[in-house]
Image (cartoon, rainbow, N blue to C red):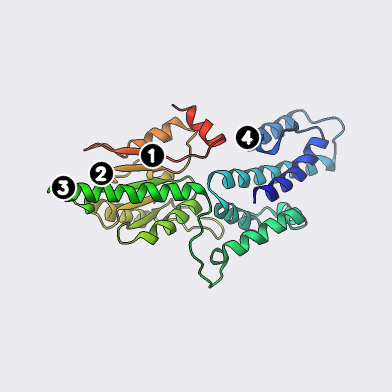
Amino acid sequence: MGDYLSEVLESFAGRLIQNNVLTRREIPNLTKYQIILSRDQFRKNPPSSIMGAQMGVVEGDFALCISLYHGYELLLQMGTRSLFYYLRSIMDGSKGLNRARSELGRNADFMTLYQQLESMFPSCNGSEVKKPFIYSHPKLKKLEEVVIQHFKNWNKQGQNSSSSSPEDTRIMIFSSFRDSVQEIAEMLNQHQPVVRVMTFVGHSSTGKGVKGFTQKEQLEVVKRFREGGYNTLVSTCVGEEGLDIGEVDLIICFDAQKSPIRLVQRMGRTGRKRQGRIVVILCKGREERVCHLLF
């Protein structure tokens, strides 16, 4: 998947490089932020060779590259399923990126990639066919392992102590993207009734992705989690602060947080009444480097 996406990125970033508005770099070393900085510089000081209608073409190429690099970062950090959800939102018009949709639809490498993703995740595309859960990123396997081991250890501890039971412990998992939250919950639902999982996302929702929760629904989820109806809550950043979640023994961060404040807010969800544990699951490379900057 990464090779096809790299080819697509190379073709569109190459147009910006030819226009001398983007510095040539290897695709894995280029970031969305660097493209945004280059676009800002172009707007402040456009090359004299670019004028009139061509200014709009270059702006469109920048917008397309920024969108594609967001998808590339999703692939690296979250996996193929999150990438598919994002690309689908472009191709079905949910994001309103009409030029991107048209350009990508004419790119053979992109369409090969997109069709492969559609065949991998038919149930995500409205198909009635249910396939076994696909671990679209190695981090999912590690997350599953950490969760199951926690409940095993807690159960063993409960057998040796009259003061605790398997129902007493709770886990909270954070991921920055709604589609990733849904994917994690689907994976953990395979382990019912040991793992009783619920998702927790914010109000707003766009396109055909995961629907947002109303305030009433949010409060109901928090209440049931606090009372033990669920023992695992998978949340976006909406669960980081301001809600009485109750006692949580294990916090798992599925992605690296660039904001120290948000990381501290996540960590603050555990260890309030008894010793808690925090696990951060990272990819080697860029995501690992981001996390090391915070510690």
Marks 3,1: beta carbons within 8 A: no
Counting from the top left corner in percent of width and height, residue 87 is at 63, 54
Identity of the residue drawn at 68% across and 48% down: 3
Work out whether 2 lies above or below 31: below
Q: Earlier in the sequence, mark 2 or mark 4?
A: 4
Counting from the top left corner in percent of width and height, residue 99 is at 74, 52
Work out whether 49 lies above or below 95: above
Identity of the residue drawn at 23% across and 52% down: 166
Give the SS element for disc 4.
helix
The residue to which callout 4 is attached is: 33
The residue to which callout 2 is attached is: 247
Q: Which amino acid does label 4 sit on?
A: Tyr
Mark 2 closeness class: few <14, some 14–19, many ≥20 residues within 10 Å: some
Closer mark to the observer between disc 3 and disc 1: 3
Q: Earlier in the sequence, mark 4 or mark 1?
A: 4
Viewer-proximal residue among 242 and 135: 135
Spatial distance from mark 2 to mark 4, Cα to Cα? 37 Å
Work out whether 215 lies above or below 257: below
The residue to which callout 1 is attached is: 279
Spatial distance from mark 3 to mark 1, Cα to Cα? 25 Å
Counting from the top left corner in percent of width and height, residue 117 is at 62, 59
Query: Could you tell me if residue 235 is visible in this image?
Result: no
Closer mark to the observer between disc 4 and disc 1: 1
| Image disc number at residue 160 | 3
Q: Residue furthest right?
A: 49
| Image disc number at residue 172 | none
Closer mark to the observer between disc 4 and disc 3: 3
Work out whether 186 lies above or below 72: below
